[in-house]
Image (cartoon, helix red, strand yellow):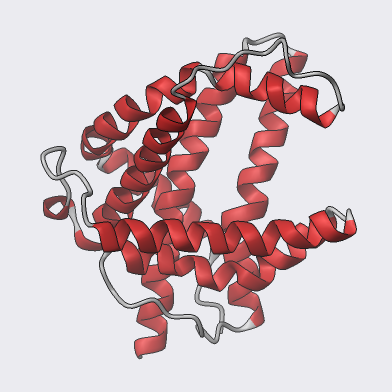
C-alpha cells in the first residue's frame, strides 16, 4: 500500500505553508538572524571551494577569523528552524514561539548526529569510488532514517527500522531528494536564460527548502498513522 500520495502531499504542504505563513515567519526570525554572518561570507566560501576544486592557490582568499563561529551559528539556525517547523506541522501553533529558542542539548546533539550520519553515508561511497550516482542510491537506502529528524523535533525516540514498502520509500525519496533538486536545476537554467539576477534563484531555493521541511513532517504523519492502524 502506498502511504505517500505525491500529488496530495505537494498540495497539502503548500496549503499548510500558505495558511501558517505568519507563524513560519515568526519562527524564522532568530534562525535567520544568527545565520546572517555566515551567509554574508558565503560567496567567499564558494570562491574558496571552487579554487580548491580546480587545484589552485588559496592564499589570495582571506576568510574572516571568526568563520568557525559563524559556521556554528549557521548550523544552530538551520537546526533550530528545522526543529521548530517540524513541531509546527506535527504539534500545532502552540508548540513553537519566537520566545522559546532551542536550547535542549540532547535534542541538538541528536539532530547534529543524525545529520552527520546521513552526510557520511551518502558522501563516502562517492569519495571512495568517484561514481556520483552512488550518492542517489545511498540516499534512497537511508531515506527512511531521515524521518527521525521529526522524531527528534518532537522529542520521541529514534527509530531505525521503518519497514516501508518500495513504493512508499520511493515516493519519500522523490519528495525529499529528486523533486527539490529538479526544481532547483530547472529554475537555475530558466532564470539564467532570461537574465534574472541570482537573487531570484536563491529565493526559489529558500521556498523549496521550507517546503521540503513541511513535506517531510507530513510524510512522517502519514507513515506513522498508517503503521499504527
Question: Which image quadrant: the N terminus?
Answer: bottom right
Q: Residue at x 26, y 68 (%)?
A: 155
46 in relation to 80, above or below? above
Q: Position of residue 180 (x, y in %)?
A: 61, 45
Between 107 and 212, the one lying in front of the other is: 107
Q: Residue at x 44, y 23 (%)?
A: 66
Q: Position of residue 78 (x, y in %)?
A: 40, 42
108 in relation to 189, above or below? below
Total numbered circles: 0
Q: Residue at x 37, y 49 (%)?
A: 82
One can see residue 219 in this view: yes
Q: Position of residue 168 (x, y in %)?
A: 58, 75
Image quarter for residue 133? bottom right
164 in relation to 173, above or below? below
Between 169 and 104, the one lying in front of the other is: 104
Q: Is residue 71 left or right of residue 172?
A: left
Q: Position of residue 85 (x, y in %)?
A: 31, 49
Q: Residue at x 14, y 43 (%)?
A: 97
Question: Which image quadrant: the C terminus?
Answer: bottom left
Between 69 and 76, the one lying in front of the other is: 69
One can see residue 8 in this view: no
Amino acid at each position: 500500500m502506498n502511504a505517500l500520495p505525491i500529488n496530495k502531499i505537494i498540495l497539502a504542504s503548500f496549503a499548510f505553508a500558505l495558511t501558517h505563513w505568519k507563524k513560519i515567519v515568526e519562527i524564522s526570525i532568530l534562525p535567520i538572524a544568527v545565520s546572517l554572518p555566515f551567509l554574508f561570507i558565503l560567496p567567499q566560501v564558494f570562491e574558496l571551494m571552487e579554487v580548491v576544486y580546480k587545484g589552485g592557490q588559496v592564499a589570495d582568499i582571506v576568510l574572516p577569523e571568526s568563520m568557525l563561529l559563524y559556521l556554528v551559528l549557521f548550523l544552530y539556525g538551520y537546526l533550530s528552524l528545522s526543529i521548530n517547523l517540524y513541531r509546527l506541522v506535527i504539534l500545532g501553533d502552540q508548540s513553537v514561539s519566537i520566545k522559546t529558542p532551542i536550547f535542549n542539548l540532547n535534542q541538538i546533539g541528536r539532530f547534529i548526529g543524525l545529520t552527520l550520519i546521513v552526510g557520511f553515508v551518502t558522501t563516502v561511497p562517492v569519495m571512495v569510488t568517484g561514481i556520483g550516482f552512488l550518492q542517489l542510491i545511498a540516499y534512497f537506502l537511508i531515506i527512511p532514517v531521515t524521518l527521525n529528524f521529526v522524531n527528534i523535533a518532537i522529542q520521541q525516540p529514534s527509530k531505525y527500522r521503518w519497514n516501508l514498502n518500495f513504493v512508499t520509500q520511493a515516493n519519500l525519496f522523490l519528495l525529499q531528494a529528486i523533486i527539490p533538486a529538479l526544481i532547483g536545476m530547472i529554475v537555475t537554467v530558466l532564470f539564467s536564460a532570461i537574465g534574472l539576477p541570482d537573487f531570484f534563484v536563491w529565493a526559489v531555493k529558500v521556498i523549496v527548502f521550507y517546503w521540503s521541511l513541511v513535506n517531510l513532517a507530513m510524510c512522517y504523519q502519514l507513515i506513522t498513522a498508517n503503521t499504527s492502524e
